[in-house]
Image (spheres, rainbow, N blue to C red):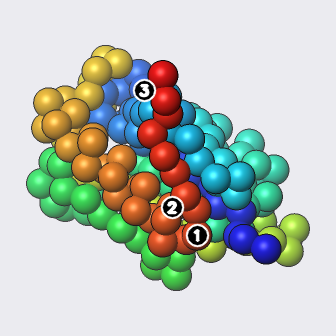
Amino acid sequence: MKDRIMVLGVGNILYRDDGAGIRVVETLENQYEFSDNVTIVDGGVLGINLLGIISSADQLIVVDTVLNHGKPGDFHRLEHEDIPNRILAKNSLHQVDLIEALTLCHALDHVPRTTIIGIEPKDLNTLGEHLTPEIESRLDELTGLVLDEVVRLGGNYSLKTV
């Protein structure tokens, strides 16, 4: 049986680049069809409330902004073992809540193997629903990285037909 793969976009679309993960998930939902073992979820800023959803996955791909002292638009990939230590810097409240939800999965005896695919933001503090040009211009590449990860984990996708 194939692993259940979940792509989870998190972030707040009201704070410029913080919405990058959600924008990727919107693209995935609107433009692609996935194999039955792949689920696409807009997690927004639900954090701890995602516990029931993420505990159903074997493999979890989180798409989000990641502060890593890089240049805006740099891509980051955090593997399962490295995530708690890297997020201790508390990049954002929803990331802290997400780590708490993953930690609580231990109590349910099912922690999905998690990978974060992220992009270094330029602006997380300004109210505005549009991404900065630096992040907007890299969104297709970020989406491609997520699609590559889906395939690496055993999922399939195709472009939707009109």
Q: Which marked residue is nearer to the observer: mark 1 or mark 3?
A: 1
Instruction: Answer yes or no: is residue 129 visible.
Output: yes
Inter-mark Cα distance, 1 to 3: 30 Å
Tell me which corner region of the image, top left, top right, bottom left or bottom right, holds residue 96.
bottom right
| Residue 54, x across and y down, in percent | 72, 55
Tell me which corner region of the image, top left, top right, bottom left or bottom right, holds residue 140.
top left
Q: Nearer the viewer, residue 8 or 29?
A: 29
Amino acid type, residue under disc 3 in the picture? Ile
Amino acid type, residue under disc 2 in the picture? Val
N-term-proximal mark, 1 vs 3: 3
Residue 145 against residue 110 in the figure, above or below: above
Residue bearing the label numbered 3: 13
| Residue 142, x across and y down, in percent | 31, 50
Contact? badges 3 and 2 (CB < 8 Å): no
Residue 52 left/right relative to 95: right
| Residue 86, x across and y down, in percent | 41, 70
Residue bearing the label numbered 1: 154
Residue 13 against residue 89 in the figure, above or below: above
Judge the density around disc 3: few (<14), some (14-19), many (≥20) Cα neighbours within 10 Å. many
Which residue: 14% across, 30% down? 133
Contact? badges 1 and 2 (CB < 8 Å): no
Which residue: 70% across, 58% down? 37
Tell me the SS state at disc 1: loop
N-term-proximal mark, 3 vs 2: 3
Residue bearing the label numbered 2: 150
Amino acid type, residue under disc 1 in the picture? Gly
Q: Nearer the viewer, residue 124 or 76?
A: 76
Outermost residue, right direction?
Answer: 108
